[in-house]
Amino acid sequence: MLRLRSELVHSQEELTGLMRDSGDGAGDDQADTGTKNITREHELALAANAREMLEQTEHALERLDAGTYGLCEVCGKPIGKARMQAFPRATLCVEDKQRQERRG
């Protein structure tokens, strides 16, 4: 969890620097501007991913404390062992996750 927090702080610092420097594009050609935009979008995506992983991990820890870790939040049945090993932050069994994805 400390690693996730560290990644999130680093991504936010990088993003802050990119945003600060984005107004200083005098003399940039289109390639420079495009590169800056792609880098900024990449840092935004990294920060969002780190934030989401941190929230999922904190939620899993809350479920451990409550005694509901490993149980589907929809149907209440145990989430399969293979799914929990592959994705320890899972909150839905395979069937309910598939239903959620079909609904969009």
Image: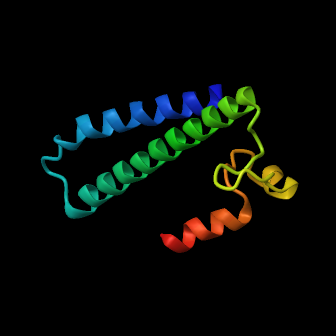
Pick out the residue farthest to the left.
26
In front of the other: 6 or 51: 51
The residue drawn where x is 22% and y is 43% is 22
Tell me, what colour scheme is on the image? rainbow
Q: Is residue 79 left or right of residue 31?
A: right
Which quadrant of the structure image shows residue 101? bottom right
Horizontal and vertical percent for residue 24? 17, 40
In front of the other: 11 or 88: 88
In front of the other: 26 or 80: 80
The residue drawn where x is 64% and y is 69% is 98
Q: Is residue 42 left or right of residue 100?
A: left
- Above or below, 75 against 49 in this view is below
Horizontal and vertical percent for residue 9? 47, 28
Q: Quadrant of the N terminus?
A: top right
Pick out the residue farthest to the front.
75
Give the number of callouts.
0
Horizontal and vertical percent for residue 19? 26, 39
The residue drawn where x is 55% and y is 74% is 102
The residue drawn where x is 36% and y is 53% is 41
Which quadrant of the structure image shows residue 32? bottom left
Horizontal and vertical percent for residue 57? 64, 36
